[in-house]
Amino acid sequence: MITSKKIKKKTILQKKGQFCTKIYMVKSGLLRSYTIDNKGKEHILMFAPEDWIITDNTPPEQPGELYIDALEDSEIIILEKGKEDKIDLQKILNRLNALQKRIVMMMSATAIERYEYFIHTYPNVTQRIPQLMIASYLGITPEALSKVKSNRKKSIKNLNLD
C-alpha cells in the first residue's frame, strides 16, 4: 500500500526497537535517520531531502536500529517494505551509493574531506540543517566543524588570490 502524508517538523516516524515495515520517499521537506549511543549521544546516519528515500534496512520481522524523524514540515510517500518495486531504481542506487561513500569516508577521510563530501552530497540542504547535526553526521564536534569551515574558507580565498 502507498500512502501520501504531510507531517510536521519533529514528527518521529520510527523509533529504535520498533519493527521497521516502512520506506519513506520525500516529496518535500527533510528527514533524517540516526541512532543514540549508550551515553545519549546522537549519531546521524543520513539526511533525506526532496526526492530521496529513507528507511531502516533492518528486515521487517526484526526490531529496527534507527530513529527516523522530520527536520522540517514534510510531505512524504510511505511504502510498505516488500513493495520496493514501486520505487525508482535510481533512487535506491543513489541511496546505496551515498551510504557506501559515507562509510568509506568515515574510515579514511579527513574532517575537511568529509565536509566537502557532505556539501557535494547534500548541496541544497546545508543551510537547512543545524550545525550540531552536520557535526554529528561528520563524526566531529561542533567546534571542529567551525574550524573545518574556517580553514575551508581560507583555502578558497587563497585559491582565488592565486
Image (tube, helix red, strand yellow):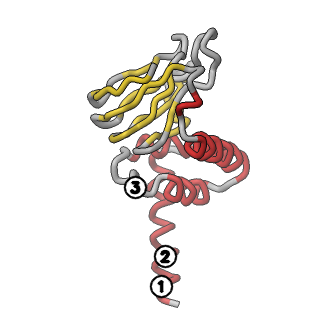
Nearest to N terminus: mark 3 or mark 1: 3
Q: Position of residue 86 (x, y in %)?
A: 53, 31
Q: Position of residue 100 (x, y in %)?
A: 68, 44
Amino acid under label 2?
Ile
Determine the secondary structure under disc 1. helix
Determine the secondary structure under disc 2. helix
Q: Position of residue 103 (x, y in %)?
A: 68, 43
Q: Are marks 2 and 1 in contact (CB under 8 Å)?
A: yes
Q: Image quarter for residue 51?
A: top left
Q: Residue at x 53, y 25 (%)?
A: 35
Q: Which of the labelled discs sits on residue 160, or is there none? A: 1
Nearest to N terminus: mark 3 or mark 2: 3
Amino acid under label 1?
Asn
Q: Which of the labelled discs sits on residue 139, or is there none? A: none
Give the CA separation, mark 3 to mark 2.
Answer: 20 Å
Whether 83 is drawn above or below 159: the answer is: above
Q: Which residue is mark 3?
A: 124
Q: Which residue is mark 2?
A: 156
Give the CA separation, mark 3 to mark 1.
Answer: 24 Å
